[in-house]
Image: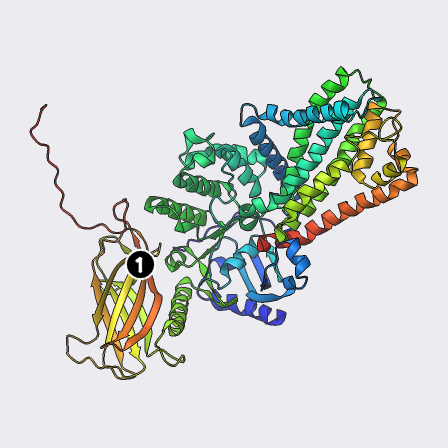
Amino acid sequence: MNTISTPPPVGPLREVHGPSSLGGGRRRFFDLLWLMSVTEFKRAYFGTVFGYLWSLVRPLMLFGVLLFVFTQVFRIGHGLQYYPVLLLLGIVLFQFFQEATQNSVTSVAAQEGVVRKTQFPRLVIPLATVLTALFNLVLNLVVVFAFIFAWGVDPTWTWLLFPFVLAVLFVLAATVGMMLSVLYIRFRDVAIIWTVFAQMLFYATPILYPLGPEGLNKPSIEHLLMINPLAVIFEQVRVWMLEPNAPTAAEAAGGAVHLLPALAIFVAVCCFGVWTFNREAPRIAEDL
Amino acid sequence: MEGRAIDDAVASPLGARGAQGSKLDAPVAIEARGLEKAFRIPTHRVDSFKERLVKPLAAREYRELRALDGISFEIHQGEFFGIVGRNGSGKSTLLKLLASIYRADAGTIRMAGRLAPFIELGVGFNVELSARENVVLNGVMMGLTPQETRDRLDAVIEFAELGEFIDLKLKNYSSGMLVRLAFSLMMEVDADILLIDEVLAVGDAAFQQKCADAFRAMKEAGKTIVLVTHEMTTVEEYCHRAMLIDGGEIQHVGDPAEVGRRYLQLNFERGSEDAVHADPTGGSSESASVRLLDGWIERLDGSRVETIEHGEAFRLRVELEAKEDAEGLDVGFILANADGVGVFQFGLPVGEDTGQRAVAAGQRVELEVELENPLAAGRYFLHCGINRAFGGGIALYVHNAMDFLVFGGPKATGVVSVPHRARATIGDGSAS
């Protein structure tokens, strides 16, 4: 019964460190990340006939309603030629952040079977969620750019900075998503808390109300808003993409030095997200 | 702790070397040193921020459950290695440590080559995706590159006999199809080391046969395979060596037959211990008034077995020892299948044929029961209950006193196949 056979040659003994956020080789990590986000994206948008259309309808509907309310009822942004485009771009960008973080909250818990029964770099799960949201954003941006050209916005060299802004936004969404996904395993009310908090962030970011003399025109509030890293990002997008003459984030904050709190918050959130996820990753399978 | 663990490691494989020399000369594929793992179980689980605010200290009260307590062993390349133990012995925890699902509190694990864990068949499947997408995703999960997985896709689908359903979402698959897909994926992933947890327990007889062939093939291909199970028949049939774990410690490493013997012994000891606590009228908790010494299934020719073919009559043998004088004993058995369904019950009064019913303390009782075997293929458990005769109450009850496997027989639905005579005739109505 116990036949002797020559085992195939395999490598030397290597230490196994147990589960972690990145474990299992860099190659495998990126393969998995790419496959997971692409399949999820395909499932959401190509599985149903109107998949892609539906993904466009949501921001466009919100845009339509807000545009009506704020230009016709509250009469904001009258002095601004590009207010509708600004509103649309802001909504689409914020929707990315909201979708990425919101979906991240339950992402790890939802993959319970995989996490508890297979060897799997844990970080892939929230990152794939954020990456899927990024694919959505890219599709939505196609429509946004159509609007931008239709409104007669002239391309400037600062458009080249847009990918950089997206990268910053992606990093923020990813680290917040990492943090939320492991916190949710311990505290199930994180899901509710984050829904409310994300809503608050939406109003704490200059999306509905443009800053500056033609917009909000309340310097003290504008200074305060610039503590929010999202507000800084969105204001810079406005300057770089649509209105070169609009107040930059530094101007809105009342001097470049006043951007330091926002920068500090950004760095702190990123570090905390990475740190909590790395700390919890080895134990996720046990705590679920 | 560390020191003792390493002593164990040195001692145990050496002890086994005499029994199984062939694979121990091969290089080491898996090496574990002093593995420890404890789980903290909160006495009161706090799972919301709200509760944490109301009771800031509640989450910090833990009960510690030691699952593994200094485990060291080596598995050599090309070895088929069995890990056996009772429920809660720590064997599944050990497998999850090897599979990088849990992290050890102490100790190291070193491995040579690519590892594919199969803790449960088809666990990484997403039912919203097609078989094609799932195979690619799972293949990459198990360490292949996407290209390698795509190359093997056809082979996987073919082995699973799912050709025309390749683009069907898994939610539309039957459970049998899912198992076939998962299993063929496991075969095609072709890792150097396979970790397998009880996957043999799934599927019908035909599928079990396919699994058996596949395992034999992997064994012949010189793969290193670690199998965690409580089925001693599987261990004895396939494994070069086996390891018995109990209470988070290694009890024995070596010859599978020896491990099997110790495992059964352990089951018996524990079974009797449990029985004391289950006994409502047992009086002193020190001991039950009857002890189960041994119990087994044998063929009618007297050979002791753990598997029996459907249709082949067999004999149940039990040895008891009375620990107190009793006016008489009635022994009863419940035969239950793997789903816990009682199939039937049988019993007998001790010593009725000779008329001498009283049993004195220290006397032994031997039981023999011959049974027909209409049982469908599957695993069966025998629960043994012994009553004092004449209303004396329960003397002993052992849940799962024995278990055995029935194989073969007709592929049909049902728990038993009852012998029957059937007739079907066509009346002389119309067309002919």
Q: For the residue carrying disc 1, how many other residues have a C-alpha within 10 Å: few (<14), some (14-19), or many (20+)?
A: many
Rendered-image quadrant of the N terminus of chain A: bottom left
Give the chain letter at badge 1: B
Residue B4: which quarter of the image? Answer: bottom right
The image position of residue B371, as x and y in percent, is 21, 61
The image position of residue B177, as x and y in percent, is 41, 38
The residue closer to the viewer here, A268 or B80, is A268
Look at the picture and state if A175 lies above or below B43: above
Query: At label 1, which amino acid type do we have?
Result: Ala
The image position of residue A119, as x and y in percent, is 57, 48
What residue is at 23 percent from the left and 67 percent from the top?
Answer: B347
Asked if residue A22 shows in the view, the reply is no
The image position of residue B342, as x and y in percent, is 29, 58
Look at the picture and state if B12 lies above or below A69: below
The residue closer to the viewer here, B77 or A131, is A131
List the residue tagged with mark 1. B336
Residue B194 in the figure: left or right of residue A70: left
Number of marks in the image? 1
Q: How is the image coloured?
A: rainbow
Asked if residue B341 shows in the view, the reply is yes
The residue closer to the viewer here, B287 or A84, is A84
What residue is at 61 percent from the left and 65 percent from the top?
Answer: B62
Seen as rendered, the residue at the extreme front is A73
Query: Could you say whether the residue bearing mark 1 is in a helix, strand or loop?
Result: strand
Residue B89 in the figure: left or right of residue A274: left
Look at the picture and state if B410 lies above or below A60: below
Seen as rendered, the residue at the extreme left is B428
